[in-house]
Image (cartoon, helix red, strand yellow):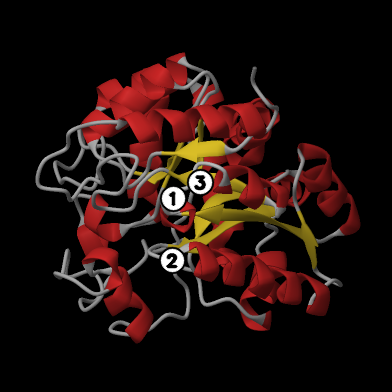
Amino acid sequence: MSPEAQALHDGAVIVDGLQTSLWGRPIFEEMRAGGITAVNVSTVLWENFVEGIGYVSMWKHFLRENADILAPVRTVADIHAAKAAGKTGIILGWQNTSPLEDKLDYVEIFKDLGVNIMQLTYNTQNYSGAGYLEEHDSGLTGFGREVVSEMNRLGVLCDLSHVGDKTSADTIAYSKAPVCISHILPRALHDVKRNKNDDLFLACAEKGGLIGLSLFAPGLKAGNDATVEDVLDAMEHVIGLVGFDHVGIGTDFSLDRPRPSDWLLWANRDKGTARKLTEFGNVKINKPAGIRRMTDLPNMTGRMLARGWGEQNVTKVLGLNWLTLFDRAWTPTT
């Protein structure tokens, strides 16, 4: 890696749109070693209200016990402050609105507690809509429209990564605020259900949203043989559709979680206990060569520059585009 690339990486605001790693001091130290300025720590999958409160409580402990390297994030200013202090900002997020149960008022309670990103559904049906593995995607429900309206009103960013295609399209069209697809890959390059189609990327960007490209090997045509170049090919495909201003990174790192593990097996069952939805909790899944840990992130920066993207565009993709989206989506909408 060239000194110029390392300098750009060190000076950039770097935002990871989603991780589900095994939280603890080793992971927090790796965030710092990789230069991550802020990360969406989105490991809520099937939890109910009480368990959602427990997740907030767990992170309050983590933040207090690791205050030398971590900082809580509620605003974009908090992310800039974390960068200035040499810390990693923690954005509380969910991959399901299951902690809301069927209570619309709970959106405000969790926003007050610092939950700034909520993925509408995770894999299957909930009160708001359908996940991508639901047998019939009937779209955004009436309750779901009210949930999205509450997110808009309060300044909660809506994520559509594991959401079904119709529910995603409905949400993009309905939401007054821009949304994100935080960790995804293009179906046009590898036709698997987990990936999303170009029309959804275009619709998301047209409403001011952001597409975060992930490192999930089953979503890449080369699978476990993929490299960082395959990830950048996927980025370039989406950039070709929506431009540099609407693309970011959402690694989907689940670092230090063995396969199989109780957590991954739970994650891959409907509601955590019912039918097995995928084999992802059992099978070997490599992250692409050259970007397998957070400490490899500078290598990705170097490869972006080597492709001729230019420093301004690279800094946008590394994190500035996320900040632009957060600034809009975290501002309450009337």
- Residue picked out by circle 3: 118
Residue 75 x, y percent position in the rendering: 77, 41
**Residue farthest toward the left in the current orientation of the protein:** 135
Numbered badge on residue 47? 2
Numbered badge on residue 97? 1
Residue 189 x, y percent position in the rendering: 21, 37
Cα separation between marks 3 and 1: 6 Å
CB of mark 2 within 8 Å of CB of mark 1? no
At label 2, the amino acid type is Glu
Mark 3: secondary structure: strand
Of the pair 32 and 17, the residue shown nearer to us: 17
Horizontal placement of 155 versus 170: left or right? right
The first of marks 3 and 1 along the sequence is: 1
Look at the picture and state if 199 lies above or below 189: above
Q: How crowded is mark 1: few (under 14 residues within 10 Å), some or many (20 or more)?
A: many
For the C terminus, the quadrant is: top right
Instruction: Give me the residue at 45% from left, 20% from top.
Output: 205
Q: Residues within 10 Å of mark 3 (few under 14, many from 20)?
A: many
Residue 277 x, y percent position in the rendering: 17, 64
At label 3, the amino acid type is Met
Q: Can residue 208 be seen in this view?
A: yes
Q: Residues within 10 Å of mark 2 (few under 14, many from 20)?
A: many
